[in-house]
Image (cartoon, grey):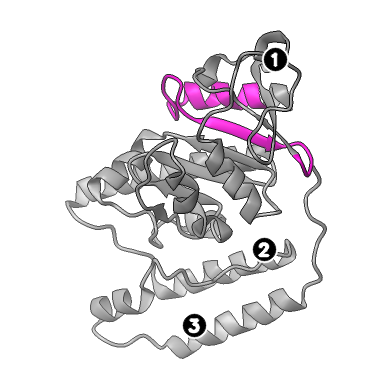
Amino acid sequence: MRSRIVEIGKLLHQKGLVAAGDGNISVRLDRERLLVTPSGFSKGFLDAEQLLVVNLAGEKVSPSFGKARDLDPSSEIRIHLECYRQRADVHAVIHAHPPMAIACTLAGVSLAKCVLPEVLYDLGTIPTAPYATPSSPEGPIAVRELIKQYDAIVLDRHGTVTVGATLWDAYMRLERVEHSAQVTLAAQQALRGPVEPLSIEAIQKLAAMRQKIFGERGRDICVECNACPVSERHSSRQGGAVDLSRLEALIADQVRRALSTSPRDAPQS
């Protein structure tokens, strides 16, 4: 696991998803311990022996010798701890500073819209958490409610938080967020205005597919995200009211299917 964190750290650095000593990575070892990156080090040049073992209060429990002896976990560990507290299915957390995602928050461009089918299927929508002073107790509060429902969150002016059952899950979701931000900003620049969302029919199909997958995993999820006002958007564009009865019937059917699905075992540590 130490080697895997070092490998992911190199990818973050090589792809420009972090700069200098930015970002942090953590993995759940068991019910009481996490393996985390130390504070102040470039994620592209980590030594496996520099990684720290901490408890769920963020306190070091690793031996007081070797390369990690005088190192401390990042103060941003608070955000990681909050993710683990809120989601038993989360076994890895990555906080990064992807430039295009941050640029979206500076430009007031939301990624919580139904625009790209791959994003809608894989992540649903990508909400933006309110601004919180970095390394402060405000960080966990900003993500507390959102992380219960979303696997990827943009932090206003600060970066992203992505979670997963494995470290690779969390990393791939980070790539998805940054790619979505790049495409969205490029499209808005070319159009000189907002990007046209997917049709209501396309959203319904993708939502149904996503609901089925989450039901198989034993997780529940809101099919229609409130961050994406489908009814208002399509009413104004099409000049008429949307038939929400079909959408409501779809949601009810998918919820029934999810509830009837036998729970799956949680991912192992």
**Pointer 1 residue:** 49
SS assignment at label 1: helix
**Pointer 2 residue:** 213
Is 16 covered by the magenta stretch? yes
Q: Which residues are magenta?
A: 5-32
Q: Position of residue 209 (x, y in %)?
A: 60, 67
Q: Residue at x 54, y 57 (%)?
A: 150
The Cα atoms of the two marked residues, 2 and 1, are separated by 38 Å
Quadrant showing the C terminus: top right
The Cα atoms of the two marked residues, 2 and 3, are separated by 18 Å
Residue type of the residue flagged with mark 1? Glu
Residue type of the residue flagged with mark 2? Ile
Picture disc at residue 247: 3
Q: Residues within 10 Å of mark 1 (few under 14, many from 20)?
A: few
Q: Position of residue 4 (x, y in %)?
A: 69, 26
In this image, 10 relative to 158: left or right? right
Q: Is residue 74 visible?
A: yes
Q: Residue at x 50, y 18 (%)?
A: 42
Give the residue at the far left of this rendering: 192
Q: Residues within 10 Å of mark 2 (few under 14, many from 20)?
A: some
The Cα atoms of the two marked residues, 1 and 3, are separated by 52 Å
Q: Position of residue 212 (x, y in %)?
A: 66, 68
Q: Position of residue 152 (x, y in %)?
A: 51, 49
N-terminal-most mark, 2 or 3: 2
N-terminal-most mark, 2 or 1: 1
Q: Residue at x 40, y 52 (%)?
A: 129
Quadrant showing the N terminus: top right
Q: Residue at x 54, y 30 (%)?
A: 24
